[in-house]
Amino acid sequence: MSRQEYESLKQGLFETIEAERDRLKTVARDIWENPEVALQESASSERLQSILREEGFEVTTGVGGIETAFIARYGQENPVVGTMGEFDALPGMSQQAKAEREPVEAGAPGHGCGHNLFGVGSLGAAIAVKDAIERNELSGSVVFFGTPAEEAGGGKVYMVRDGAFDDVDAVVSWHPGWYNAPGKGSCLAVDAFDFTFHGETSHAAASPESGRSALDAVQLLNTGVEYMREHVSDAARIHYVIQNGGSAANVVPGEASVEYLVRAPEREEVERISEWVRDIADAAAQMTRTDLNATKTSGMYGVLPNHTIADAIRENMEHADFPLDDEQAEFAAELRETLGDGEGAIQQIPEPNRDIAREEAIFSQPIDALDEGQTGSYSTDSGDVSWNVPLGRFRAATWPVGTPAHSWQAVAAGESLGTAGMEFASKTIAATLADLLEDAELRQQARMEFEERLAGHEYESPLPEGADPYELVKR
Ligand SMILES: [Zn+2]
């Protein structure tokens, strides 16, 4: 393909996305207006599916045992490229599209992480690539992965276990944020446990000698872990919450439970620490003459970055325009006012862009990765995807500068303002998927980097045997 053909191919992708602008904005708003939390996203999932079906994609639902998870595929040929779309909302985050804290309905869910934009942005890209395949400008197949329940602890891990990503050559995905940059960093692997102790109830004052306190066991477990904490790596994170500590002070608690999360950069370390925590739990049961039920409830891998795809994403960002209209810009400025000076966040941006970020309400200028060589202190179910297929990730500016995810401002921005960044994301994904379909060398480089980063490790699902997605735990 000549340079000129290549440019006209990308122009064609952008034109499709622009032609779809109104429809995509409407779908993003509809999902925003009907926020559905993890595993209950049936209307949102169905909305995306029905458009994909209309566009000629073949849709498989119920992937990984999750009713709202789906794969939509167009084409039978190799190579196969994919993108992912999330669409779950957060409980309690209801908020109107205005520049002051005011829920639509107090206590109701809201799109605090911009997943309405996430799903629809990726949808726009999948449609554009499909159109180009249909016009014979590209050859191969494109897959849209409908990935639910991100907020509840990881629908993608179940989709991976089901083999959903097995025959895909590369995946490009994004997440809403307040800047436009590819991701080159990693994050923490995690395991989740439930420890439930069983003792004997008795009157805490009249016959304590007959009781065996399950709460004592929980306390000793937590205390033991606090002493262990000094002897794990600095990057590890261990947190717990007592979910059941008994019901009344005058009753020796016969049952008590605590939930644990163990995180570290490498899965091996997560597993080593988890084993130690289990030993402490056993010892706590012994000390208190109680019985222990220890259950692993969930697990995830850290992200394997792919710099090859990240560089292609960065290059394409230069050509994708950012269609912010006056009304959106005005609302962005109002929202930004509610966020303080945002200096804490702005400091992440290196000069000279830091000054631009400081001045703008929406920071639309693409920048280089901010996280190269870093391991973020969070976990994501994209980690498991990245261990199975070369995965490129980026953030696009759907929120005003410095907006934290899961804030009311993020919800407010998601109704309309964020659709400019969403379109930018659609174009960036579409152009990068086109590169991956068209350029065998790029594909191979991405694969080689992936193999190198695997360093001979074999992916084994971190999920416990027979894990049920509908018992997902919160991270
Ligand atoms: Zn999110």
Image (spheres, rainbow, N blue to C red):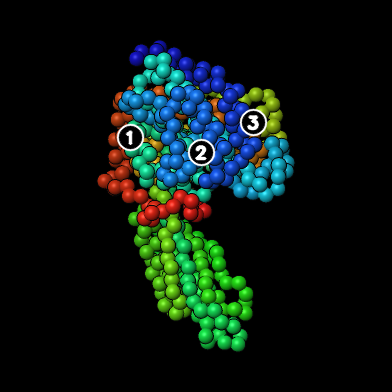
Q: In terms of image quadrants, where is residue 382?
A: top left
Going by the numbered disc 3, the residue's amino acid type is Ser
Location of residue 285 in the rendering, given as x and y in whole percent from the top left corner: 44, 75
Report the side of 343 relative to 286 (left or right).
right
Tag 1: Cα neighbours inside 10 Å, few (<14), some, or many (≥20)?
few
| SS class, disc 3 | loop
- Give the alpha-carbon distance from disc 2 to disc 3, as whole Å: 18 Å
Going by the numbered disc 1, the residue's amino acid type is Asp
- How many labels were placed on the picture? 3
Q: In terms of image quadrants, where is residue 440?
A: top left
Q: Earlier in the sequence, mark 2 or mark 3?
A: 2
Residue indicated by mark 2? 86
- Give the alpha-carbon distance from disc 1 to disc 3, as whole Å: 36 Å
Q: Nearer the viewer, residue 133 or 190?
A: 133
Residue indicated by mark 3? 416
Residue indicated by mark 1? 167
Tag 2: Cα neighbours inside 10 Å, few (<14), some, or many (≥20)?
many
Q: Residue at x 41, y 26 (%)?
A: 74
Q: Nearer the viewer, residue 227 or 74?
A: 74
Tag 3: Cα neighbours inside 10 Å, few (<14), some, or many (≥20)?
many
